[in-house]
Amino acid sequence: MHTLTTPPPPAFDVLSPQCPSRTVLRHVTDRWTPLIVSALEEGPLRFGRLRERVGGITPKVLTETLRSLERDGLVLRTVGPTSPPRVDYELTELGATLAGPIQTLRSWAQEHAEAVLSARDRYDAE
């Protein structure tokens, strides 16, 4: 009997300039994505509350980043049947898998900020 086998998925190599995983990495490590994912890790938020949680982001940039995250399948935008419509944002199942790695980076940045700032000061003093 002949069995059909599924070919292995393509190998992705983020260090290769032609690899599409590079755009994925660029999206998930841009300036705002880690902060938005961290805020949404706690649960769904409305736009205004999300903007408050991610201090310093403009409404335009938040909208653009949320659209990009929605396009990438990381964020779900839900419009409620109210007037005016209630819009909530939450991580998708895929987006939730990104929360752990981002939390690791966030913890690293917070734990090592003093050492990095000291290194900058030493470098700039030379």
Image (cartoon, rainbow, N blue to C red):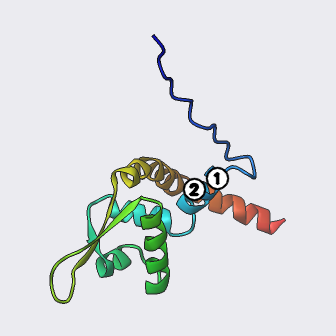
Residue at mark 1: 20
Q: Residue furthest front?
A: 1
Image height check: is 7 above or below 36?
above
Residue type for callout 1: Pro
Task: Tell me residue 18's x, y (percent).
Answer: 74, 52
Horizontal relation, residue 4 to residue 93: left or right: right
Seen from the viewer's position, the closer of residues 94 and 126 is: 94
In the rendered image, the residue lying farthest to the top is 1
Q: Quadrant of the C terminus?
A: bottom right
Foreground mark, 2 or 1, reads 1
Q: What residue is at 47 percent from the left and 85 percent from the top? A: 60
Name the residue nearer the viewer: 6 or 120. Answer: 6
Query: What amino acid is found at the position of numbered circle 2 in the picture?
Result: Val
Residue at the image point whose x is 21% and y is 84% from the top: 85
Dot 1: few (<14), some (14–19), or many (≥20) neighbours within 10 Å? few
Quadrant hosting residue 82: bottom left
Q: Which residue is mark 2?
A: 24
